[in-house]
Image: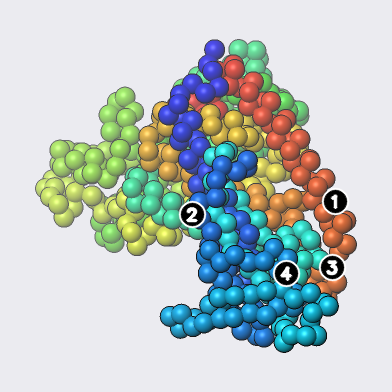
Amino acid sequence: MNTIFSSAGNLIIFILMLGLLVFVHELGHFAVAKRLKIPVPEFGFGFPPRVLKFWQGAGWIEIQGKHIIIPRKFPLPQNLNVGSNVVYKTEMQKGREVLTGIDVIDDESKGLLLTSPVQNLDRGTEYTLNAIPLGGFVRLMGEEDPNVPGGFATAKPSVRIPILVAGVTMNFILAFLIFCLTAVLTPPYVTMQTTSIAGVQPGSPAAAVDLRVNDVIASVNGQDVKNNYPLLSQLLRKNAGQAVSLDVIRNGKTLDPVTVTPRANPPRGEGPLGIALNGWVGLRISTVEPGSVADKAGARPGDVLVFLVDPKGRTLRDQNEFIQYTTAHPGWKIEWRLARNNQLLDPITVQIPEKVDASNATLGLQMQTSLLDAPKTALDDMWTVIASVPPMIGQVFSGNAPANAFVGPLGIYQVTGEVAQRGGAIALLQLLGLLSLNLAVVNLLPLPALDGGRLVFVVLEWIRGGKRIDPQKEGMVHLIGLAVLVGLMILISVFDVQRLISGQSILPGP
C-alpha cells in the first residue's frame, strides 16, 4: 500500500507549486488594491497562524487634499482613523511631503486648535510569515464591512471590480507565460486516439458481443466514427443506457452490425463499452514550405504527423530525429499518417529525395515552435483547456463525468508526484500552467465565496444604480457558499484518500 506522502521531494514540489499559484493570485489583488488606494493592512506569506512580521511598508495619509507619506517606522496614534481631527507636521524629503508629527484632537479640544480632518488613511502594509506554507493571503481594509471609511466594501464598483478580477488575471498571465515557455521547450506532441481496440475488459458490454483486440469501430448508429475518437466517445456517452448499432471492421472486412448497450455508470477506468483504444503520438506541423514534398503530399499547417519510423511503432521524438531519418534514407518511399481536426486521414505515400541535404531534409515541414509562434500556440492551447470546461460541467450534471474529473489538494499532490516521475521538470512546468489556468477559470465561476460570486454582487449593485444589496444578506450567501465548497472539498478529498490508499494512478496509463 502506498503511503500518502511517499516522497519528501514530491511534497516539497507540491507545496512550492500550490504556494506559487495562490501567491500569484493574491499578488494580483494586492497590486491593484494598492494602485487604486485601497489600504492593505497585511500581505501574508503562507496561512495563519502568524510566525513573524518581517517588514512594515510605508503608508500614506490624505489631509486637506494632500497625499502625505507615512514613514515606515513612524508611530501612528492607535485612535487615528478616517474622519479624525488632527494637527500634524510635515517636511519635504526627496520631493515628497513626509509626515513628521501627528496628534488626534478630541471633540472637546477641537475648537481650541486649528485642526484638519483625515480624508483617507493607509497605515502601511505588514508583510508577515505564517506557519502553513500554501501560498498567501491579502487582507484589505474594510473588506467585508461597508461602514469602514476608505475600505474595500465602501469603494465604487469601478474600484472593486478591477481588484476582484486582478487575482484571476494574474493566474491567466502566469499560465500564458508558462504555456509560451513550454511550447518552445518541448516538441509539439499531440496524442491521437484511434478507434482501433487495444483491449477488452472481461464481463464488459464489448466482451458480451465478442469485440476483439485490433477490431476497428467504424460507425455508431450509422454515423461514421472511424479513427474519430472524440465523436465515438461523445456518441457512446450520449446514448449511455440505450442500445446502439456498431459497424466493426475485423481483418479488413466489415462485420454484420453489432448491437450493444453502453453503460451509464461503468467501473472506474473502463468506459461505457469496457474497451481500451490504440493511440498514436504525432508532431504538430507549424509550417509547410510551398512546393515542397510535404506540400505536394497534402500536408497543411496545424496537421499532426503520425509517422511510424520502424516496425515496432516508435514515433518521432522531435524534428531533429525526422531530419536524421530522411538523411539516412534517401530515395525511400515512406507512409505518412496525417491527422486533421482530431481525425486521422487516409495513409499517404511520400518519397524522400534521392539527394538529401540541409535544404530539403525536412521535406518542407517545420515541427517545432519558434519564439514568434509561441504566443499563438499558448493561446490556442489555453483556449482548448477553457473550452473543455462547459462539456465537463455538462457531464457532471448528467452523471457521466470521469472518476478523476475533480480532485482536491491530495489529488493535486498525487498528480504532481506522478507527473514528476513520468515527465520530469518540463512536465511539472506544464502542470503548473494547467493548474494556474484552471484556478483562474474556477475562480471566475459565479459561485458564492469565489471571486466570480463576489463579482455578481458588484455587477448587480452597478445595475441597480449604486444601490447595494444588504451586506448582511450578501455575507450570508457567501458564508453558505463557502460551507458548500468546503463540504464538496471534503467529499472530493475522501475519494482522493481512497485512490491513494488503493494505489490507483490518477493519470491515464502510458
Depicted 230 relative to depicted 476: above or below: above
Alpha-carbon distance for marks 2 and 3? 34 Å
Answer yes or no: is residue 337 visible: no
Q: Residue at x 24, y 50 (%)?
A: 363
* Three-letter amino acid code of the residue under disc 3: Arg
Q: Which mark is residue 476?
A: 1
Q: Earlier in the sequence, mark 4 or mark 2?
A: 4
Assign a secondary structure to mark 1: helix
In the image, 130 versus 311, the foreground residue is 130
Alpha-carbon distance for marks 1 and 4? 28 Å
Q: Which quarter of the picture shows residue 116?
A: bottom right
* Three-letter amino acid code of the residue under disc 4: Asn
Assign a secondary structure to mark 2: helix
Q: Which mark is residue 174?
A: 2
Assign a secondary structure to mark 4: loop
Answer yes or no: is residue 333 visible: yes
Of badges 1 and 2, nearer the viewer stands 1
Q: Position of residue 364 (x, y in %)?
A: 26, 54
